[in-house]
Each structure stands twice: as C-alpha cells, then as structure tokens.
Image (spheres, grey):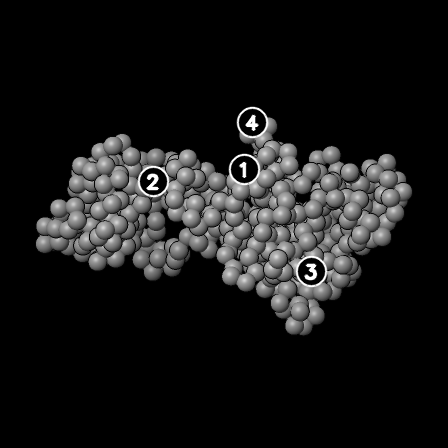
Amino acid sequence: MTRAALTGVKVLDLSRLVAGNMATLQLADFGADVIKVEQPKVGDPLRQWRKGNLDLWWREYGRNKRSLALNIKTQRGQELLLSLVRRADILVENFVPGKLEELGLPHCRFLIENSRLVILSISAWGQDGPYRNRPGFGTLVEATSGLASMLGFADGPPTLPPIPMADMITGIYGAFSALTALRHRDATGEGQIIDLSLLEAIYSVLGPVAAEYERTGRYPKRNGNRSTNSSPRNTYATSDGKWIALSASTPKMAEKLFQLTGLGDLLDDERFATNEARVRNGDETDRIVAEALGKFTLDELMRRFDEAGVAGAPVYEVPDFVTDPHVKARGILAEFDDPELGAYRMHAPLPRMSATPGRIRAQGPRLGEHSAAILEESLGLTPQEILSLAREGVVGQ
C-alpha cells in the first residue's frame, strides 16, 4: 500500500464541533496521527449531533482519528498534555480567546515546551479586536459577514445556510494553513501561531463586495437564485414537476441556450441581446426562459443540453445524488464497513491525489477508545499508572 503523504505528522486536536474537526479530518485522511483530546464523560459536542440515535456526524468527521479522554482542567491532566505537546507537530484548538490562559495553558506555554510546534487557533471572531471574547458559532458569523443578507428572496427574510458553511470553509483553510506553517517549520525550525477566525474565512468567499460598495455605492441584496453577474441564472420547473438549474455565465452559452429552446429572437432584442441587458431585465428574462423550459421534461432538457453543449444540471435531492451514475463512477461516496452499524457511505477523502491518495481507515472513535494506547506508546505509562489516572478522573477509557 502507498505510504500516506502525512505519515509521521503528529496532531493534537483540542477543538470541538465542526471547524476544528474539518481541519484535522483533512490531515487524518492523508495519514497524520490525529489525537482527539476530549473531556472525559463529555467528549466533543459533535458526538451529540444525532439523528435517530445515530451519531453519523461524529463517525464521518471524526474518522481516522484517535480519542484520548483527558481532563486538562486538572494539574496531572495538563502535565500529560504538555508531555504530548513536546512530541507534536501541530496543535489545534478553538477555545474562546482567553480561555486557555484561564486554564494556565496559554499558547506561549505550548511553544516553550516545543518551539517547533504549529498552533492552529480557531475562533469565531479572532484573537484580538472588540469581539474577541464573544462566544460564537458559524451561524453568527454567517450573519455578521453579510452572507445571510444576500441569501433568500427580495421579499423574504435574511437566510442562513442549512449547513455549517462557515465552519467547513474555516476547516479547509485550517488544514491548508497548518501545512503551510509546517513547511516553514521544516525549513527554519520555527513554530508559530495561526490566528484563524470563522468571520474572516466566510467573508473571504463572498467576492469583492467591499470594493464594489466603496467604488459604486452598491452591494449585493437578496435576489433569490439570480446572479448579479450573468443571466439567465436560476432554477426552472420542467413539465414533469422537476427542476433544472441554468447558468449562462458566458455570452456563447446564453446564445446556445436561446437557440436550443426556440428563443433565438431574443438575441435581436436590445433588452436581452447582451449579458448586461439580461441582468438589468432579470424578471422578464426569467419569465421567458421559464416558459420555454417548462414545455420539456427534465430528461428531455438534459439530453438536448448534453448534445448541444449547453450548461445545465438537474436539481437533485439526496436520493438522486447517491444513485447518480457520475457520482458512482467517480467514487464520490466511499463505502465504509462500520463494525457497529454495518456498511454505509460517506464522502471520500479529498482532494484526489495520484501518488498519495487519502484513505478511510476507521470511523470516528468511541470516547477515550485510544486513551491507554496513546499514554502507553507516546509517554511510556504502565497499565497500572493509566488505571490509577482513570480512578482519579484524569483519564477516561
């Protein structure tokens, strides 16, 4: 079997919920030894995201990691943590700024123990600024960043994404930044602290909205499924009660679409002849396109679009996606045989790498599943010492 790209990289994950777990998932999928440091009896709150008593969020985003149940609020627990810090390459935490200092574990203490350590510190608002001490979740930064004000229809309320979008984007930034810092460390011997906020991560993907406002006085408002950059761009009902998505992002694509659907005359109408005109006349553009597309079934449209090279895609629900032939051919979903739940599918490791692909080795572990093994292998503790720590409430098994 091919040696994993991150074999030998040791990660201590003190984070909870989504962003930190998304970051360390990337590292674990490609071979890093990720030790989840969790509070005994409580564990990562992501374990409690259950549907029908199934902890599938944890099993997927905690995969390939090892769980150490360690009470870092105790002196002995902190001593054990610092011993692990000396052997680590990366430490990930997402405490509210100032909380680690209250526990007696400031970042500088970690760096004193290990000057080569890369510390990825994730927070909602950042390590400084007026909001640094505020608790926060992705929902709040999705609101403050301006994202929620852009989502939804003009006559409806600001809309929040139905998924932890800010956390997921932050997690991917986190993995990238940790590996970037690790490359610097390997070249110079110098560790560092990465200050990564959910607010800045989600804002970074919104486009040049600040520049647009400063230069023109305009900024994005709720506009349904439309784009301010191209038209037509929306979802349209088909004759069989299904939906198709279109994005005519180039003039040539719009021309192909109009010719294929019997709307070629629009290209001679100044209201629709150019992309800028179609964006300006968005209501009428959508009305005409919707009427034309509504005469066809979804399958008919997709067949015609594929033959003509027109960009369109069906609007899927989950059952449609998991049975799609392209999804199957690409292996977008990887089947995992869970020893407790049996076989089920989860997203395959990303990105796809030709020489060192990621791999799913294990589902998210039970709380404290690897406590004894980690303390014995990494710190040389004996079974008797580990049992004593368990009795004292320092370690969970």
Left or right of 33 on screen, residue 205 = left
What's the amino acid at mark 4?
Answer: Gly
Q: CA distance from mark 2 to mark 1?
A: 24 Å
Confirm or deny contact between disc 3 and disc 1 (CB under 8 A).
Answer: no
Q: Which residue is mark 1?
A: 344
| Category of crowding for the residue at label 3, using alpha-carbon neighbours closer than 10 angstroms: few (below 14), some (14–19), many (at least 20) | few
Q: Is residue 296 above or below residue 198?
A: above
- Kindly identify the residue that appears in the image at 26 percent across and 40 percent down: 299
> Which numbered marker is on residue 186?
none
Earlier-in-chain disc, 2 versus 1? 2
Left or right of 105 on screen, residue 295 = left
**Residue 103 position in % (x across, y down):** 76, 47
Q: Where does the C terminus fall, quadrant-wise?
A: top right
Task: Kindly state the secondary structure of the residue where label 4 is placed.
Answer: loop
Earlier-in-chain disc, 4 versus 3? 3
**Residue 176 position in % (x across, y down):** 56, 59
What's the amino acid at mark 3?
Answer: Gly
- Kindly identify the residue that appears in the image at 77 percent across and 49 percent down: 374
Earlier-in-chain disc, 4 versus 2? 4
What's the amino acid at mark 2?
Answer: Val
Earlier-in-chain disc, 3 versus 1? 3
Q: Which one is in front in this view, the residue at disc 3 or the one at disc 1?
A: 1
Earlier-in-chain disc, 3 versus 2? 3
| Category of crowding for the residue at label 1, using alpha-carbon neighbours closer than 10 angstroms: few (below 14), some (14–19), many (at least 20) | few
Q: Which residue is mark 3?
A: 8
